[in-house]
Image: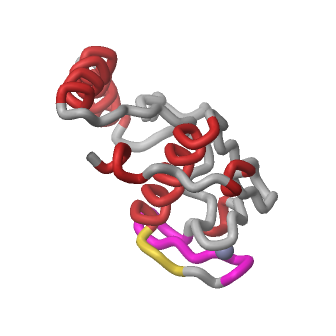
Amino acid sequence: MSRSGKGTEKKPGRNVRAKSGLNRAILDQGWGKFLRQLSYKQERRGGLLISVNPHYTSQMCNCCGFVDSSNRKSQADFKCIACGHEDHADVNAAKNILAAGHAVFACGEELRPTPSKAVKASSMKQEPFLGQLVA
Ligand SMILES: [Zn+2]
């Protein structure tokens, strides 16, 4: 998220100064403090905060589990090249993150999709208790 926009000598980046300012603003936000506060508020309301590995959640199809960077047609569009499922890219990724959270909650497993492989959470044999996650 805060990678430098400088680019390489052969292919220099554009809007480097603006990207530098954005990076500074992102890094100044104090994400650790935000997570502590979010966890505290969730526990206070009787909820639960589960952290999941977000890798490839934006490239994985929520219907069939196929993972490929080609699934992502643009920043907003997602279309699975395996099954044809279409959705807004952020909604598709959010569903994958929710499924990963359910997998962690149900069986303590982590959903780790890898590129070019159809991956399903192996813990789907057990139903997650949705009430506590949504609360
Ligand atoms: Zn698919």
The secondary structure that most of the magenta stretch takes on is loop
Please determine whether, in this image, residue 18 is positioned above or below residue 66: above
* Residue 29 appears in the figure: no
Is 131 situated left or right of 135 in this image? right
- Between residue 4 and residue 11, name the one nearer to us: 4
Tell me which residue sits at (52%, 80%) in the image.
86
Q: What color scheme is it?
A: secondary structure
In the rendered structure, the answer to whether residue 36 lies left or right of residue 117 reads: left
For image coordinates 52% across by 36% down, the residue present is 52
| Quadrant housing the N terminus | top left
Q: Front-most of 80 and 107?
A: 107
Compared with residue 118, is residue 18 higher up or lower down, i.e. above or below? Answer: above
Residue 18 image position (x, y, % from top left):
28, 35
Q: Is residue 54 visible?
A: yes
Q: Is residue 106 magenta?
A: no
Q: Residue at x 25, y 31 (%)?
A: 42
Q: x and y percent of residue 44 in the render?
A: 19, 26
| Rendered view: 39 above or below 114 | above
Range of residues picked out in magenta: 73-83
Q: Quadrant of residue 7?
A: top right
> Residue 78 in magenta?
yes
Residue sitting at x 63%, y 68%: 71
Relative image position of residue 87 (x, y in whole percent): 46, 76
Q: Quadrant of residue 10?
A: top right
Of residues 65 and 46, the one drawn nearer to the viewer in this rendering: 46
